[in-house]
Image (cartoon, helix red, strand yellow):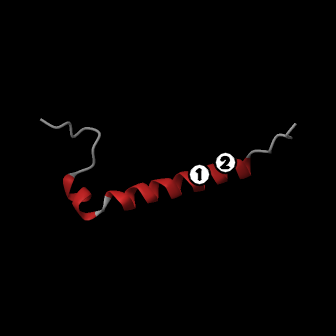
Amino acid sequence: MQSVANKPPVSTQSRIPQILLDRFENEWRAMRTANEAAEKPVPPRE
């Protein structure tokens, strides 16, 4: 028996390769981190 609670539907998996999902997630994380860094003042480095 497989747990489907934390997994996307099989139809989505078959249509979208896992590599694309990973790349999209990585790019989204990078954009979000960049936005947060731009919004917050950068502390002076010592």
Residue at 54% over, 51% down? 29
Give amino acid for label 2. Glu
Label 2, label 1: how many angstroms apart (C-alpha)? 6 Å
Vertical order, 35 against 5 (above or below): below
Secondary structure category for the residue under label 1: helix
Split into 4 quadrants, where in the image is the C terminus? top right
* Residue 27: % across, % down: 52, 58
Give the residue pinned by disc 2.
36
Residue 13 falls left or right of residue 28: left
Quick one: 8 or 17, which is closer to the camera? 17
Split into 4 quadrants, where in the image is the N terminus? top left
* Residue 21: % across, % down: 38, 57
Residue at 21% over, 40% down? 4
Report the label total: 2
Q: Which image quarter: residue 7?
A: top left
Give amino acid for label 1. Arg
Residue at 62% over, 49% down? 33
The label number, if any, that marks residue 6 in the structure image: none
Residue 25 falls left or right of residue 33: left
The residue at the far left in this view is 1
* Residue 11: % across, % down: 20, 58
Secondary structure category for the residue under label 2: helix
Q: Which image quarter: residue 20?
A: bottom left
Give the residue pinned by disc 1.
32
Residue at 80% over, 44% down? 42
Estimate how packed mark 2 is, as few (under 14), some (14 to 19) or many (20 or more) residues with alpha carbons within 10 Å: few
Find out whether the residues at labels 2 and 1 contact each other: C-beta distance under 8 Å: yes
Estimate how packed mark 1 is, as few (under 14), some (14 to 19) or many (20 or more) residues with alpha carbons within 10 Å: few
